[in-house]
Every structure is written in structure tokens, then in C-alpha cells.
Amino acid sequence: MNDLIQHLINGLAAGTIYALVALGYTMVYGVLKLINFAHGDVMMVGVYMGYATAGHLGREHQSTFLGATLVFLLSMAGCGLLGFLIERLAYRPLRDKSRLTSLITAIGISFTLSYGFQLDIGFLPGASPRAFPEIIKPHEWIVIGDHDVIIWNWQVISFLIAILLMLGLQILVFRTRFGRAMRAVSFDHRIAALMGIPVDRVIAFTFMLGSALAAGAGILYAIKDTAVQPLMGLYVGLKAFVAAVIGGIGHVPGAVAGAILLGLTEEFVVGYAGDVLRGLGAVLHLDSLGVGFTGSSWRDAVAFGFLIIVLLVRPEGIFGRVTAEKV
Amino acid sequence: MRVLRFAVVALMALGCATACEERPKTQESETTQGTGAATGAIAASGETGPADANTILIGEVGSLTGPEATFGVSTRNGIDLAIQQENAAGGVKGKKLKVRVYDDQSKPEEAANAVTRLISQDRVAVILGEVASSNSLAMAPKAQAAQTPMITPSSTNEKVTQVGDYIFRVCFIDAFQGYAMAKFAHDTLKVKTAAILKDQKSDYSLGLTKVFNTKFTEFGGKIVTIEAYSKGDTDFRAQLTAIKSAKPEALYIPGYYTDIGVIARQARELGIKTILLGGDGWESPTLTELGGSALDGSYYTNHYSPEDPSPHVQQFIAEYRKVYGAVPDSLAALGYDAARVAVDAMRRAKDLTGPSIRDAIAQTKAFPGVAGTISIDENRNAVKPAVVLKVEDGKTKFVTTVSP
Amino acid sequence: MESVAAPRFSGVPGWLRGPLPILLSLPILALAQWATAQAPFLVYIASIVGVNVILAVSLNIVNGMTGQFSIGHAGFMAVGAYIAGKFSLETKDVYLPFMQSVAASDQLMFVFALLLGGAVAAVFGFLVGLPSLRLKGDYLAIVTLGFGEIIRVIVQNTEMFGRALGLSGIPQRSSIFMVMFWVFLTILAARRIASSAHGRSLLAIREDEIAAEAMGVNTTAYKVRAFVISAFFAGVAGGLFAHFVGIINPGSFTFVKSMEIVVMIVAGGLGSTTGSIVAAVFLTLLPEALRSIFTQLGGGDQTLAQRVDQIRMPIYGMLLVALMLLRPQGLFGTKEIWDVAPKWLSRRRKGMR
């Protein structure tokens, strides 16, 4: 039972991070119909910005409330700027070209960032992982049984921050003038332009918002998993994308639901799939092939298997709408 | 009809291919002394032959860039130090030694490329490398075919030296290291149950897992669960939760230091208080930076300890510190040993051809390496003890030695 | 034989026109084999180049000619490499009594291994091609990527394929003759497809899928076929790779390898076989050349030479972005060498266009 609770907590924590990253994917896709492949890597850059800020603050200041807030705000602002630059320099000139062109550009940016950060020239950090400073001093909040399940203060704080960010986004998109403009651009950007909406500015702002959100997610991720490394964005980005597709890409609450579903599925595959596999293996005599029955070793395949099934069965995602293609 | 003709001609062509194919097998073995007439045919590949008649070129392949760079760089430092010292001591047969090193980004195809380049372009006398067993396995057949002796400083997979009689190593093998930790855990720590968390992306980790599993069970212990992760993961909570519910007394994590710190922290966070055990992949100055206090009280097996009081070990540490400003890790020590074994063999060999050097390396007995005394056995492996180190307050302490 | 059926521009009899290029290639390849017998490094580099050319040209059939976007080509390569490598390992000591010598028998087994690897990869190509029925563009791209990753996870979990260590000790039966022969076959196949009715349908799908369908092109069938052909050659490339490197492990067939191939065809020009070949050769030799130059210039200090590989990946990334911004059609666009060569060279071709 305690096991199950612990797995639930782990899955929720992972899902929350995926959700924040997936929101950025979904928003950008909503307004541009572009899969921003570099999104995960923007997140990685944000984490390194947080790492650098915390390093400058020093050990005493980084874990104060003010210090931690500064780490968050600075890296979110920095990433917002990075998102703006990427959109302005790489995506905007290609907006009228084919979608493939933009996709290749996105992959190019992703490569430049994730491999560029592996160099150790100049300010670049190099390939080795670094320990992320503890900007929230960890202590145990709730202990169930004899340390069977422990809930830490930073887990609760991270969860609250994530919820706050999501609520903020929801309000921004559905309750403000700007949000209405965003939705209009997403619906049809040519007509939006005719209605006097500054499409370029809306798209640029969406990008900045998504990137800042990614930076926030990245810091929470680094607090959770304690280490920073240049390739961290690649897989988180892919998984968040999968989550966005599962929920129906372009759909904000869908992305959150898809992300939490993915986080929990991965967790339970590791926790319990081993037993199921062993059972299946005994029935099908798979052991003669030497296939491994450790549930955790199949974790990497879960997200993609999930994705392929969703795309084949319901390509528009769980919450997405079916749209007819206009000729 | 046309398709049929196409197929017939294609088959004929393949027939011709089979006919043309009988030569290279025997010819490749001569290439060390070959003229390499056609070698310069592509300008792009460059002409980088041996420097001149008064130097002996030693080839080295290592991962100097990428995620495993620290292993390659430490090894290279050790080798460079050894060669500097040997040159200062007069070189070999009146000639100076020089190392040519190529990066393989830790990819087998690049390692095979680099070793081919060393053999046929640079025509090196001996090859040193690689750290990772899969890369050494890519290099070994090429070195064997060209009759160029190869010494791997730290590839611990059994298969490497089984490739042929030109392939040697100066470290112990996976089987021994797994055995050493199983023995230590059972006999010294008196642990009855253990869990294993393996890195499924690394053959090294799988090898240690297998041996630890069988040996620990043989000694009367019980393996309660085996979980897996992939190198580069950052969230290990799911596996650790499963391990926690199995309630082991010790957790064996035969992985690389890059992941160990994070695993240890997350284990403590989940309330796992068991002893953590590991292998030589833990060895790195950044291990404790990443793991912090979560690693206190853990043990790992290693090739050598900087606390070894023997004068030649302390002298090595002092000189290494003078040149590179750091205490050498075990990869540096093994690189240093590999280079010195090679040089020692070249001194004893009657000439500098591959077969003579090979014979000399095979006869190495009781060589005083800094990472243990090296005797090459009939399987071309070094027979030597393992040390067990304990992590305490961000430092490693020598605990004991386990002999074969 | 029958001059009536003979084509207008040459005296080659009709029945010979199909297989003629293959016949012509054989003595050249045999010569190359003979000339490089003393230079294993040259052979190794040429083999790597050859494998990359096969991969680029075959990926170009899907990405360039058909306009789909696959970024999981290394997955097919892995399937071919593992199947062919496993087959060769298992049949290492098998000797076919009807062949004159052991070496000849080995070579026949090698060819069989390659065909087997290619065939199994083609089956996987069929499976991956199927979703293209419902998915297009970016979605398909992600599915191919996911496929590549799933292949990797399966291999990692299967004892038969050696898990993380991979398969080692694969007999090194590859030769420059064999690699170049397959390079030649791949290019020939790509060209023949492009100039056939089949190829026209693929191009129509690339230009406008809905219009193509309206014109009666069975788009799904053609797309799946393109995937199957492309996967077959990628599988063969993997088989060749396994037989000259001698060891394969999952680390050689990652997303990064797929991206390298994508960079090649994008740089060369999506849809241009010539472009794919030129870019594959150039991008494979470039790091080698830089390494040599830096070793020469650097003398004792080799840090630059060692950094070549480290710097390569971010440069590829920037190259992709720059190409898309400045010359999205790549080096050759969709043109081939004879389209851009001086007119007097391409005179012979005019009538056919």
C-alpha cells in the first residue's frame, strides 16, 4: 500500500514537470502549427541560467526565499528572451514556407543548443553533469509509518508552483485581451490580421511565454532530480511532446492531463510491469529468446509506444477536435 | 523479364565479387610493414606517418570528448606522464617515445576507425586503449589482424582479450570485480540480502550485475530484486521505490559516477538507508560533488588507492600532482601502468616488430605497477587484487584488499 | 541484336540496357579492390563513406522524393545490422561445399546475410510506413523517431542481441568491392525509381498529396512502398557496417545517427540523389580531413584535432538552420548533376527529357 502511495507521488511529480513543458509545446503549436523541437533544450538552457544565478548568489543567499525567487525569475526572463530571439531570427522568416522547413530548423536549433552546451569552451559548461544547488532547503514534512513514505517540503512547494503557473496561464489565455488575441491567431492568423490583431507580436509573445514556462519547469525539474546536464532537455522535451499529443495538441488542459497520465504510466510500468512481463513470459515461453523481464528496462519505450497507439487509434488526441482538411 | 535479367546480372556480379575476394585476408597482416603505397590516394586522409627514424610511435585511442571524456582524459594523462618519465630515463633502444592519440567519442565505429588509422597511417609499435569494453572490442580484431600488440588499461569485459594473442590488459576482469564485492559484502559487511540497480545501457554494468548475482547467491546471500535504469536518466524514484519495498540490507549499483550521485540522493530522499555498494565506475573526483552526504558510508571496489603507502605509488602520485595538479584516479593509474608495461616490453624485446613485442608483453611477470603488481597470465589478463574503498565526508578511504 | 527496339542515342541493344551499368561497374570495382589491398585505413574510410551514401540515398527516396519526413533511419540500419550480424555469427563456420574455396563460400554467405538484413528491415519499413496512412508531416516524423527508439530498447533487452555490449566478433567479410557494389546498386535503384512511372507518382505525392490522390494516385500504397525500399537499403547498409566494424551495439544507432543522415540529405537538397551523394561524401570526410590537418598543424599539441568531433554536432545544427534560412532547397535542390552540368556534357540527355 505504501508502495502504491509512493509510486503515485513519484508519478505525479514527474507528470507535473512534463505538463509544464508540454504547455509550451501546445501553445506554440496552437498559434503556429509548428512542433518546436527545441523547446526541451530551451528548458535546459534555463536550468543552466538558474545554476549560474544560484552560483553567483552563493550558498547562504541561494536558499533564502528571495534568492530562490530571483533564481526563478532571472532564468524565466532569460529564457523568454532566448525564445524571442529564436522566433525572430529562425522561425519568423520561414513562416510562409512549408512546415517541413520550420521543423528542420527546429531540429537544427535543438542540436545546436544540446551539443553546443556540451563543449567546454568559454562560458559553456561541458558534458559532465553538475549538482544543482539546493535552492529550497529540504526537510521532511509528512512521514507515514516508519519512513515508509516521506513527503518533502520542496515536493509540495514545486507542486504548488506548477499549479500556480498553470492557473496563471489559463487566466491569461481565457480572461485577458491578449489571450483572446492569441486564440484568434490560433484559429486563423490571416483573418486575425484582418481584424487588426498584431499577429507578429502575438506570436512572439506566445513564444516568450512558452520559453519562460519551460525555464520554470526546468528549475523545478532540477530541484527534483538534483543534477544538470546538457542532454536533459532532449528526452524531457520528447516526452512532453508525447504528452501534448496524447492530450490533443493545441489543447491546454489536454496537455496537462496527457502529461500526468504519461508520468503515472511510466511510473507504474517500472513498478509493476516486471511481474506482468514475467507472467506473460512464462505463458509465451519468451525466456528462450532471452528477453529481459525487468519492468524498469522498458521504461524508455513506454512514451513512444503510448504515442504510436494514440496516433493510430485517435490521432487528434484524447481531448482534441477532429478538423477537416481544407483544400 | 527485365527484372529477371537484372537479377541474373546482379548474381553474376556477386559471383565475381566472391572470386576477387581471396586476397586481402592474408595481405592485411603485412600492413604494419607494408609500404602503404595507395594510402596517400586521398589527400583528405592526410599523410601522418611515423615522425622519423629516431622516435617510436605509440598509438592511443580514448574518449576524450563527450559524456565519458573524464575517463579518456585521465587515462591520457597517466600515459603521458609515463612516457615523459621513460623518455627522461633514456627512451627505448636509444630512441625517444611519442604518443599519438585519437578521440573516438566513445563509439565503436570511431574506435575501429582510429585504430585502423594508427596501424596503417601512423604505423605505431603498440596500441594503448580503450576504457570502455565495447570500444576495445571494436579495436582488438584490427590490431590482431595487423599483428600490432594492444594493451587496454581498463576494459574489464572478459571477451576483450579473447579476441587474440596480441590483446592484453593490465586490469582485472568483471568477473573478479563482481566476486570481490560479493565477497566483501558477505564476509566483511555480513550482509544477507542485497538488491541490484543496473545500468542497462552499459555492458560493464550488466557484466558486474551477473557476477555479483551468482557469487552473492553462492556465498549464501539472497538477491531480493534487480532493477534497471539507462545511463543519463535523472529520475530513479520508480526503481528505488520498488527496491525499497524489497527491503534489502545492501544495494549494489554497478554504474558510472555520473548517475551514482543522483541515485544516492534520491534513495536517501525516499528513506532508503541501506548501504550502497559499487564498482570502479564510481571512481571520479566529481562523485561526491554530485552525491554529497548521501554517499557517506558507501563502499566500492577499485583498482588502486592513493593511500597505498608503497614508495613507488606515492612517488607516482607526487609527480602526477606536480604535472596535473590533482590526485590521480584509478584510470590515470591504469593508463600509467599500461604505458609502462608496453615500454618495459619494448626494452626487453629483441626488436620492435609486432611479434617480438607481443612475446615480451606476454612474459611480463611481477611488474611493479602503481595499481597493483602485474603478472600477465596465459589468457593475457593481469592477475591482481582489488581494493575496497569507503566514502566518508566527501573523501574515499582505503578499507581492505580482496585477492583472487 | 534488334536495332528496332534499341534506344535512339546509343548502339546498346535493348536487352542490355538494364544490366549494362552493373556490368560496366564490375571491372572498375575490381580495380579499386586491387588498388586498395595495401591500405586498410583507406578501405575503412571508403567503407564508412559508402555506408553513409547508401543511407543518404535511400533516405532520400522517402524524404526527398515522396516528401514524407522520416527521422528514424538509423532504426532500419540497426535492424539490418543486427539481423545480418547475428546471421553471420551463427553461420561463422558453415562452409558451402559447392563453392570452390572457403573465402568464396564466406562471401556468398555474406551476400545472403546482407539480403536477409535488408529484407527484415524492409518488413519493418512496411510496419512504419503503415501509419503514414493516417499521419503526415510532423506527426509521422515523431512516429519514425519513436520507432527508432523502440528498436533500441528491444535490442537492449534481448540476450540474443547481446544487450548493451551488442554483437562482437562478427566476421569481417566486407570489402571495398562489396560496399561500392551496393552503393552503386542503391544509386541505380534510386535513379530508376525517380525516372519511372512509380517515381512520378512519388513526386506527385511530394508536391501535393491531395491533388495526387485526386489524380488517381494510390498515395498510401506508394508511400508504404517508398518506406519499404528505403528501409531495405538502410538494412543492407547496416549489414555492411556490421561486417567491417566487427562490433555493433545500440549506441551506434541512436537518434543522432538518424539526424546525421537527415543533415546530409537536407544539405544536398531534398529530392536530389546527386546532392545526397555529394553531401554524404563531403560530410563524412570533413571530420577526418580536419583531424588530419589539425594533427599536421598542431604538431605535439593535438587539442584541436581532438575537438573536431566535439564541435561537429553543434555545427551540424547551425548548418541546418542556416541552410533553411538561406538556401532551403539545399546544394542541388531537386536537380541532378546532368541538370546543372554544362550543356555540351548533357547533350545526350536532352532527348529523354
Image (tube, coloured by chain):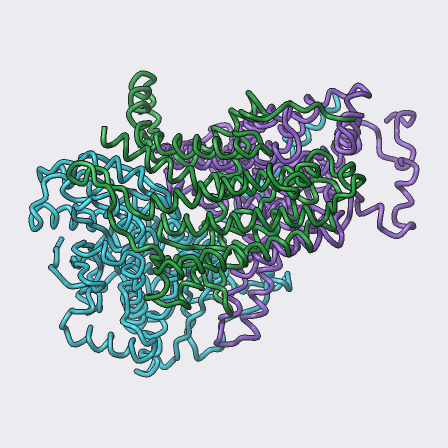
Where, by quadrant of the figure, is residue A252 drawn? top right
The purple-coloured chain is labelled C
Expressed as whole percent of the image width and height from the top left, the position of residue C231 reads 60, 32
- Residue located 52% across and 43% down the image: A168
Q: Is residue B140 left or right of residue C59?
A: left
Q: Is residue B364 left or right of residue A95?
A: left
Q: Residue at x 16, y 76 (%)?
A: B311
Q: Is residue C225 visible?
A: yes
| Residue B196 drawn above or below residue C311 | above
Whether residue C237 is visible, yes or no, is no
Chain letter for the part of the structure drawn in cyan: B
Residue A182 position, x and y percent, is: 66, 40
Q: Quadrant where the N terminus of chain C lies?
A: top right
Furthest residue toward top: A283
Q: Nearer the viewer, residue A34 or C170?
A: A34
Question: How many marks overall?
Answer: 0
Q: Name the quarter where the C terminus of chain C is drawn.
A: top right
Q: Which chain is green?
A: A
Task: Look at the picture and state if B125 lies above or below B97.
Answer: above
Q: Position of residue B290 (x, y in %)?
A: 31, 58
Q: Residue at x 49, y 64 (%)?
A: A124
